[in-house]
Image: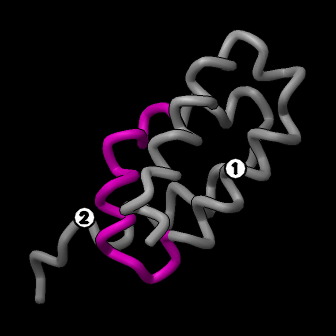
Amino acid sequence: MVRHIGLIEQLNNLMIKLKEKMFYYRDLYQEIIDFFYLVCFNNPIVQGYLLKELNFFVDMINQRIETGILISEVIKCNLGDSDT
């Protein structure tokens, strides 16, 4: 449902627009990242949707925004298990 109403895309666009002021909106960014994690936890469809923003999430680490668990969850199902 969250994906169909475009909430993920809208929140991501908001973060991109506020990128220059990320330091001032760090709490907001962290809340959005936490929300993304909850939405994509064990959900390969949403994980794939967020995969295209992976570089942006990695860049946020330099701003002291905890994105590690989100990044881990996003790539979990998108790397593919070639050994299985």
Q: Main secondary structure of the magenta part?
A: helix
- The location of residue 46, given as percent across then percent down, is 38, 65
Q: Give the secondary structure at mark 2.
A: loop
- The location of residue 37, given as percent across then percent down, is 60, 65
Up-down: is 16 above or below 20? below
Q: Earlier in the sequence, mark 1 or mark 2?
A: 1
Instruction: Name the foreground residue: 21 vs 13.
Output: 13
For the C terminus, give its image quadrant.
bottom left
Locate residue 43 relative to residue 73 in the image: left or right.
left
Instruction: Name the foreground residue: 53 vs 17.
Output: 17
Question: Is-magenta flag for residue 80?
Answer: no
Up-down: is 8 above or below 29? below
Q: Quadrant of residue 27?
A: top right
For the N terminus, give its image quadrant.
bottom left
Q: Nearer the viewer, mark 1 or mark 2?
A: 1
Locate residue 80 relative to residue 70 in the image: left or right.
left
Q: Which colour style is shown?
A: one colour
- The location of residue 48, given as percent across then percent down, is 29, 60
Instruction: Name which residue lies at 24% across and 64% down.
Output: 79
Up-down: is 24 above or below 53? above
> What is the spatial separation of the Cα atoms under label 1 and label 2, in whole angstroms?
24 Å
At label 1, which amino acid type do we have? Answer: Ile
At label 2, which amino acid type do we have? Answer: Leu
Instruction: Name which residue lies at 65% across and 50% down.
Output: 67
Instruction: Name which residue lies at 45% across and 43% down.
Output: 9
- Write down the residue under mark 2: 79
Instruction: Name the foreground residue: 50 vs 2.
Output: 2
Are there few (<14), some (14-19), or many (20+) residues within 10 Å of tag 1?
some
Q: Give the secondary structure at mark 1.
A: helix
Magenta residues span: 40-56
- Write down the residue under mark 1: 32
